[in-house]
Amino acid sequence: MPRVLVVGGTGLAGRAVTAEAVERGHDVVVAARRTPDDDADAYVPGAVYVTTDLVTGSGLEEAVDGADVIVDASNGVGRQAAHVFAFGAQNLLHTAARFGVNSAVLLSVAGIDGSGYAYYRAKAEQERAYLDSPLETRVVRATQFHDFVTAIFERGRPFGTLLAPSRTRFQPIAVADVARVLVDAAEGAGEPGVRTVAGPRIESARELAEQWKRHSGSRRPVVPVRLGGALGATWRAGRNLAPEHAIDGIGYGAWLSSRAA
């Protein structure tokens, strides 16, 4: 079994990838800026954790040493995203190549091509770094996670509402389903290049918010809001959707039910 290095393995997607890879019997190393305590939610028993900073390069050599494949689920917020995705990717890939790592899998986002949204532009640059590297690379673009869509609704909590972007549809996907695809790719499934995976159903933001409201028992009203900027324009144009790449995974309603249980 190949040794898998999960970069950003303490984040939402990274934890799911780590758990999936450990369950399949892989030797798993997690690289993260902060390593979790044994009892932390981010800790996955069976994985080895290495403190690493992609931007400065600190800890990278220790992390990649002995790895056969990298699964990059790293993330950044605000201006930090450009540094993590651009400089961080270059540091990681150069170090990996020096240490003889054979292949890489990158988690990316569906619909980023041509978007003016800064985060998406940074992700596109990260993709190019991977695809231009000497490593055999598989990029997996995913539609929005169930957790992410729910977080959008919850931004209305301080105002006693549920916020639903108007004229916007989502095709949400379960993190666990994406993790399985990423680990499959780490094991060599599929051709190198870019692949998109999407949730099983396309629904309006309002329909999804109403589902959340029913499952949570909330009495807060669903309030439509127009999301401005490049991200809002991208979503309203439906570029975040990929109906031809839908997988038979966990739908939003089923995910909500599993959380309640």
Image (cartoon, grey):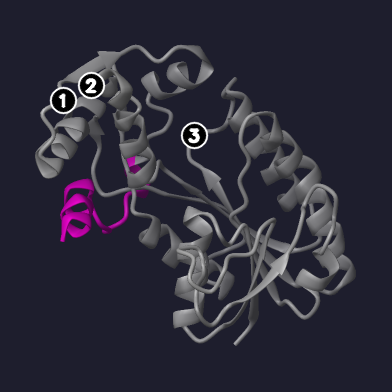
Above or below residue 156? Residue 98 is: below
**Residue positioned 70% across, 35% down in the render:** 80
Left-right relation of 141 to 6: left
Mark with earlier residue (2, 1): 2
**Label 3 – label 1 distance at C-alpha:** 31 Å
Above or below residue 233? Residue 186 is: below
Above or below residue 209? Residue 166 is: above
Q: Quadrant of the N terminus?
A: bottom right
Q: Residues within 10 Å of mark 2 (few under 14, many from 20)?
A: some
**Residue positioned 75% across, 72% down in the render:** 102
**Residue positioned 56% across, 76% down in the render:** 187
- Where residue 174 appears, x then y in whole percent? 34, 54
Above or below residue 209? Residue 44 is: below
In the rendered structure, does residue 126 fall within the stretch colored magenta?
A: no
Q: Which residue is mark 3?
A: 111
Q: What's under tag 2, amino acid-wise?
A: Gly
Q: Quadrant of residue 169?
A: top left
**Label 2 – label 3 distance at C-alpha:** 32 Å
- Where residue 181 appears, x then y in whole percent? 45, 64
Q: Which residue is mark 1?
A: 220
Q: What's under tag 1, amino acid-wise?
A: Arg
Q: Nearer the viewer, residue 11 or 27?
A: 11
Q: What's under tag 3, amino acid-wise?
A: Gly
Mark with earlier residue (2, 3): 3
Q: Residues within 10 Å of mark 1 (few under 14, many from 20)?
A: some
Chain part drawn in magenta: 243-261
Look at the numbered discs 2 and 1 and tell me whether their residues touch, using CB distance below 8 Å. Answer: yes
Q: Which residue is mark 2?
A: 160
